[in-house]
Image: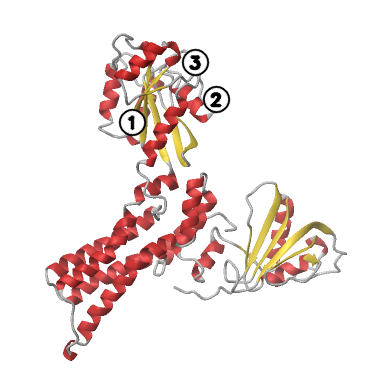
Amino acid sequence: MDLAATDDTIVAIATPPGRGGIGVLRVSGPEARAIAEPILRLAAPLAAGRARFGDLLDPSGLPSPSPTGPAAKPRVLDQVVATYFAAPHSYTADDVVEISMHGSPVLLETVLQYTLRGGARLARPGEFTERAFRAGRLDLTAAEAVRDLIEASTLAQARTAAAQLGGAVSRAVAPAKRDLVTLVAALEAGIDFAEDDVETMDAARILDAIDRAAAPLRALTETFAYGRIVREGITVALAGRPNAGKSSLFNRLLGRDRAIVTAQPGTTRDLLSERFSIGAIPVDLVDTAGLRELAAEDVHEAERAGIERTRSTVAEAHHVLLLIDAAALDRRQPALQPEDQATLASLDGRPATVVFNKIDLLSIAEQNSLQASFPEAVLVSSLTGAGLEALRRRLEAKIAAERPSDDTTLVTSLRQQAAIDQALASLRSAAAGAAGRVPHEILLLDLHGALSSLDQLTGSTSPDAILQEIFSTFCIGK
């Protein structure tokens, strides 16, 4: 991989689109200072690592890079703070100038166009971070964490991304790489100096070394299920018969009226999804059409399609809340209706919680009797909010059950998991070869394969196509 500094200068607006209190223009490359300085009139010259206050001059009153006539006296457009970072002590390891101005879109666009005319090139999405990676300031797991930190919508996501940005995954993998390098060196020495009576490793020692290298990788791969939940969230589907109160509970959990609620059964014909968080984990809550058996002569095509979508969503959800109208039960001997029993059976043991709704229509004695009959169920009232906190705690406990200890490094992306799985597969192949007394030259093929997979994890040997795919998902300006 070419780690040399790039020879062109890039520019982008580093703050989100729209109006704001502050807008930041970022210029990076060997000509960053020369391009930015003509539009700045500062209290003191730019200096490395210093923020300078001053005026932003109207580019229309400045000489263009190829002047064709006399320039007018420059006008002041804004008061700004300009910060200069000299190479290699910057995010990209190039010269960087950042101009913080008021967040007017027209102001930012005017200055951006001036820097482009001055010789800068508009940065691609993620190109600043890509330059930091290519300069060796970040490994690939840390670079991915930059994107995750920007996109974090919960504190758990931010904490996990910050840990990876600090090199948590690379540190977790480092012992395995050290053990593999030591083992490879020993085996290669035994091959290269076989005629000099250099001691070779026996199968037992090789197997022990392979197991030591694999141990931290196995620990990492076991965190992926929860790491993916932290990064992507979970889907919770509200299911049940028509008029069980799914839409009302949907609105209650979100804290706002998002779904239409009427007394008429079958109001919800399509899926309605909103994101909120439980225990710092993002949750996509899905309100679904009521489940019921439609007779062949029924012509409610919209409802029929809604029911089919509901069944598909329930089959794919991480967790299902099966809502049951508590007021419609036999209060002397509560029992699930056949449709509800069929829905539970269709889950085939997947995570689900039975929720009895409308308990405001039951007496306290009837509520106690219902809870005694279904001790694992949660009793709620979408009308009064009773039981909502207990339901939140139940969902949080279900999520927390998959969480490793707080200080465990999490693998959060499928790319990271795939690289670790490939390394473990190579180590399993090497272990089988060692147990079968295959020649060390063959073992080395698998061991080098494991090292190559770990290098792809951190980006040491990642093909450019993979890098382009990763960095293209970043926002422009980062």
Mark 1 near mark 3, Cβ–Cβ under 8 Å? no
**Image quadrant where residue 286 sits:** top left
What residue would you read off at disc 2?
Answer: 257
Q: Position of residue 102 (x, y in %)?
A: 74, 52
Instruction: Give me the residue at 27% from left, 21% from top.
Output: 341
Q: Amino acid at mark 2?
A: Asp
> Which one is in front in this view, the residue at disc 3 or the one at disc 2?
2
The amino acid pointed to by label 3 is Thr
**Looking at the image, is mark 3 or mark 2 earlier in the sequence?**
2
Q: Report how many numbered discs are placed on residues in the image.
A: 3
Residue 352 image label = 1
Q: Is residue 468 in sight in this rendering?
A: no
Drawn side of residue 76 relative to residue 5, left or right: right
For the residue labelled by badge 3, is the local secondary structure a helix, a strand or a loop? loop
State which quadrant residue 203 falls in: bottom left
CB contact under 8 Å: marks 1 and 2: no
Which quadrant of the rendered structure holds the N terminus? Answer: bottom left
The residue shown at (32%, 26%) is 376
Could you say whether the residue bearing mark 1 is in a helix, strand or loop?
strand
Up-down relation of residue 110 to residue 179 (above or below) = above
What is the distance, in whole Å, between disc 1 and disc 2 at their CAs?
Answer: 25 Å
Q: Are marks 3 and 2 in contact (CB under 8 Å)?
A: no
